[in-house]
Amino acid sequence: MDDATRDRIQSLRRLTTKELKTLYGELFGEASPASNQVHLYRRLAWRLQALAEGDLSERARERAAELALDADLRLRAPRKFWEQATEAENREKTQSNLRDSRLPPPGTELTRQYQGQLIRVKVAPNGFEYQGKRYTSLSAIASKVTGMRWNGFSFFRLKRESDL
């Protein structure tokens, strides 16, 4: 790129959006559909370079026209695709977030000896069963048994995967 073109492109930075739009009309022969100053600057800089260095070759223009006619060409996936992908991802996250990795699978029985009595808790799909009652957390069961607040994982000695 020659110095004159480089200087002209640099001078674009000092122009207001209105001035850029006016110059756009002069260089492109039509009004600018955009009012974004950065976008206008880039388009004008490209146009000035193209005028100084030469435009696309005829072969490149023909290839671009062929690609534009290709009906299967998509720049973005359809909105429905993204909606379905987001729903599936949210479902996975929700299911994985609901189930702590320290918990054994549903149906497993957790046991703990505490002050001479054997505590048996059955892991259910959405909670725990202890003495015929349903509980939402192991901490609630541990507190019921001990009469004090306990971390259920600590009480039943369930370790994190990183602690194993």
Image (tube, rainbow, N blue to C red):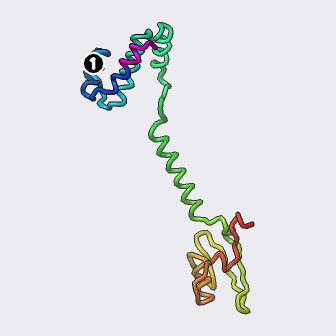
The residue sitting at 46% across, 41% down in the picture is 80
Q: Could you tell me what secondary structure mostly forms the magenta stretch?
A: helix
Q: Is residue 1 above or below residue 160?
A: above
* Image position, residue 46 (x, y; %): 41, 19
Q: Is residue 34 above or below residue 154?
A: above
Q: Viewed as shown, does residue 38 lie left or right of 97?
A: left
Q: Viewed as shown, does residue 43 lie left or right of 60?
A: left
| Residue closest to the far right | 164
* Image position, residue 96 (x, y; %): 59, 60
Task: Give yes or no for residue 73 being in the magenta stretch.
Answer: no
Q: Which residue is mark 1?
A: 25
| Residue closest to the far bottom | 116
Q: Viewed as shown, does residue 149 lie left or right of 40?
A: right
| Residue type at the position of mark 1 | Gly
Task: Give yes or no for residue 3 being in the magenta stretch.
Answer: yes
The crowding category of the residue bearing disc 1, from other C-alpha atoms within 10 Å (few below 14, some 14 to 19, many at least 20), is: few
Q: Quadrant of the C terminus?
A: bottom right
The residue sitting at 50% across, 13% down in the picture is 63
> Closest to the observer: 54 or 118?
54
The residue sitting at 59% across, 73% down in the picture is 127
Q: Is residue 64 above or below residue 100?
A: above
* Image position, residue 70 (x, y; %): 48, 20
- Quadrant of the rendered structure where residue 55 is? top left
Q: Give, as a single range, the part of the protein colored magenta.
A: 1-8
